[in-house]
Amino acid sequence: MSQLVGSGAGTSLGMGSMPDVARNGPGTTPNVLILGTAEWDSAIATNQHYVTRELAAAADVTFVESLGLRRPTLRRADVARMAARARRAFASATPADGPKTTGRPRPDRTRIVSPLVVPVHRAPTRVLNRTLLRRSTAAWLESPRPRVLWTFTPVTYGLENAADVVIYHCVDLLAKFPGIDGVAVGKGERNLAAQPGIVAIATSQAVHEHLLSAGFPRVELLQNVADVSVFTEGSRPAVERRPAAIFSGNLTTAKLDMPLLESVARALQGRGELLLAGPLAAGGGSFTAELQQLEALGARYLGLLTPNELAAAAGTCSVGLIPYSINDYTTGVSPLKCFEYLSSGLSVLSTPLPSVQALTRNNRHVIAADSADFVHHLSRMLAPVTDDVITDRIDSAGRHGWDERGQVLRNLLTAELTHLPVR
């Protein structure tokens, strides 16, 4: 995974610059509509949040919050989420130059849209949802060209037909996630694959293969990166490290291998500490009972941390954990936390996710192990190391940050815009 800057059947993603109003006159700044799969203020920043930030450096961006591909239940969290969405949807639209929202900072030149749609994407709701989504995105639909649709969901309700450039940024095997409407996802991907000139971006080899098999004619492989500078700043010298292993991310049974985590907690009793950080049960059912069991075994829950708080916590540890179950969904995952951990000066211990196994071939600080050997490797990796080793770990993550990736994405968009016919 050392070649993370992109590959595929399309054009080269070389250095370049986005068309700019100052050079090309009024009306040439791209209008980018990003269809997300999460809320803007969701607990953990993911690809879609960083892509929004990076594209907003050179374009006018509208970020549309999740259309609700996971069918809601009557659980308290889902009801609260739907109520919050309704409040945002009925509130006045946030102008691009107006006050910034609370929560996650909103880049300049960015609008956040909360569409009020029915979270069921089948024939009975399609006409209604299409009307509601077009109403929510009217400002983009009426904006000057060029118009760009950069979508993280294949459920688009035909918005691609109003775009000059269409990019499908696929970060997961979405149809395999528990609770997601796989029929709607499959239909949406088939529709997008037939869109003339579409570019698909895959964040793992498994996703790349899936998109090719789904009929996308051009797929760029751009595996996940991290906001490495934040974590590098939190890294501490060897003398301030302790024998602690940390997992940061969504605490959910949909991803985590609970028996393995319990084995880790037991192995660390009297020798070190297991730290957990992140939101509970994001899209994957309650995690309360599982967390209580881990805490009974000595694990410590740090709660939901800001990136700077997480960097400070990770910077004193020894090992970063990716204890995921291996299933149809996680085989397509490319954990950006690999590079968060490395840029914190940690070694990385993961279950054998395909994307992590690929990384182990080029990075001696990353180990992929099955459940039988996981604790054995952890014991060895908790041993004290020198400052030179910590520096080497940080350096190994250096090329896998958003500064470089943002340039790659802007260059890709520049290339697509350059090929448009003159209007």
Image: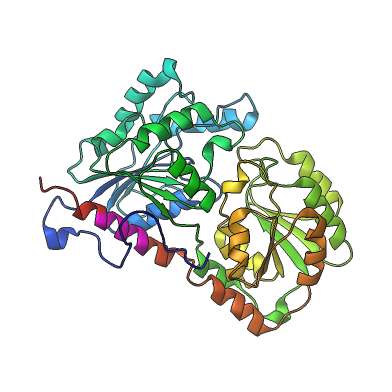
Q: Nearer the viewer, residue 103 or 410?
A: 410
Left of 76 or right of it: where is 82?
left
Q: Is residue 399 above or below residue 165?
A: below
Q: Position of residue 288 (x, y in %)?
A: 75, 40
Q: Is residue 387 above or below residue 405?
A: below
Q: Position of residue 20 (x, y in %)?
A: 19, 60
| Residue 295 in sight | yes
Left of 229 or right of it: where is 17?
left
Q: Is residue 51 above or below residue 113?
A: below
Q: Position of residue 290 (x, y in %)?
A: 78, 43
Residue lying at 89% horizontally and 65% vertically, measured from the top left: 270
Tell me how many marks there are: 0
Q: Quadrant of the C terminus?
A: top left
Residue lying at 24% horizontally and 60% vertically, measured from the top left: 18
Left of 209 or right of it: where is 239?
right
- Magenta span includes 306: no
* Most common SS among magenta residues: helix
- Residue 231 is drawn in which quadrant? bottom right
Q: Which residues are magenta?
A: 407-415
- Magenta span includes 411: yes
Q: Nearer the viewer, residue 44 or 163?
A: 163
- Residue 236 is drawn in which quadrant? bottom right
Residue lying at 47% horizontally and 28% vertically, measured from the top left: 184
Q: Position of residue 159 (x, y in %)?
A: 30, 33
Q: Nearer the viewer, residue 74 or 12?
A: 12
| Residue 298 in sight | no
